[in-house]
Amino acid sequence: MARRPGLRQLAAAAGVSLATVDRALNGRQAVKPETRAHLAEVAARIGHPAAARLAGGAALLPEVTFGIVLHKQGQDFYKAFAEELHRAVAAAPGVRGRLVLEFSVSQSPSDMAGLLRRMAGRCDVLAATAVNHPEVTAAVEELRSRGLACFSLLSEFAPGARAGYLGLDNLKVGRTAGWMIGLAAKAPGKVAVFVGGHRWHGHELREAGFRSYLREAAPGLEVLETLVNLETRQLTYEATLALIARHTDLRGIYVAGGGMEGAIAAAREAARPGDVAMVVSALTPESRAGLAEGVVTLVTDTPLQKLCAELVARMARVALEGAAAAGEGQHFLPPDLHVRESI
């Protein structure tokens, strides 16, 4: 009589470690649902007696629906963000995750507040990028009263009402941008800073850190009045061309949020590489090309893979255990810094 395959044979046939098989059979939460399902299929195919047990184990995992609301669906950064979220939810340990992802059509507080409210009943826990505005805060408070916790992403909003914040320490990011432009500027002169809007708390913190550093360490650089670009390429492009034409002593540009593509294009057209130092806030094909050409000096990038993995883990805990499981109010990740020689 042929011997039944053992755990080692199952692990080898499935292409996983023996420890993974052990964890799956013992119902431990570290095994991904797709891994457990794969093991069940392989066990059935080779005639391992644990096939039924493995198939039933996946169904024992709790289901969690993760609701996410982002901005700027067409921007490379948010496209990459969405892709990482899908991967993180699929790999969420200990749960069977499902992602409900929506994009806001504008930065309008009323539009965002309405979209947040419409997520109620569609998910077990929520996270969003949003401006910090009383209408948004009221929506988050209403959702909380209905049992739906909401995390703020990248830029803080609804403090005291949201479940937690995940993103960069934006004040430090701004100071880092100031440090680089202060270092790269070839002479005293003018420096420009773009923000997406005055209601983006993260942009305000970046601007404050940027100005603070240059005031302390580079008094020869004058920071011009802040420009609002609504995170759009065209507005940033036109404004950057005007800056370069108006200020022959322009030494630096900091784009604290979106719209950097316009600044890169304008500098590429109107300035010699290196004459105007530029710091932008996401590593995309456009900013990578700008670094290679010497148009961009520094990219302060958000580590999306780490952010999404941490976000999904925290959201799952809150969905299963309640808002008290959110932990500390703010969770900062260190930025990924990219210069020309590091890409």
Image: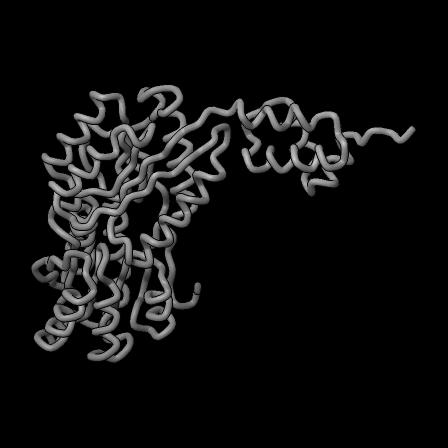
In the rendered view, does 145 fall on the left or right side of 198?
right
Residue 231: image x %, image y %? 19, 57
From the image, which quarter does the C terminus lie in?
bottom left
Q: Quadrant of residue 243?
A: bottom left
Q: Is residue 2 above or below residue 191?
A: above
Q: Quadrant of residue 308?
A: top left
- The residue that appears at 36% across and 59% down in the rendered structure is 283
Q: Quadrant of the N terminus?
A: top right
Residue closest to the far right: 1
- Residue 281, given in percent of the width and then of the height, sits at 29, 56
In the displayed structure, would residue 160 be above or below residue 281? Answer: above
59 with respect to 285 (left or right): right
Q: Residue at x 25, y 53 (%)?
A: 72
User: Viewer-proximal residue, 245 or 196?
Assistant: 196
Q: Quadrant of residue 8?
A: top right
Q: Is residue 3 left or right of residue 132?
A: right
Q: Is any atom of residue 153 visible in this view?
A: yes
Q: Position of residue 187 (x, y in %)?
A: 19, 72
Q: Residue at 22% x, 39% y: name it.
A: 156
Residue 220 shows in this picture: no
> Where residue 38 sits in the image (x, y, percent)?
62, 38
Question: Colour scheme used in the picture?
Answer: one colour
252, 148: nearer the viewer? 148
- Residue drawn where x is 76% and y is 32% of the image: 47
Q: How many marks?
A: 0
Along the line of sight, the residue nearer the viewer: 3 or 171: 3
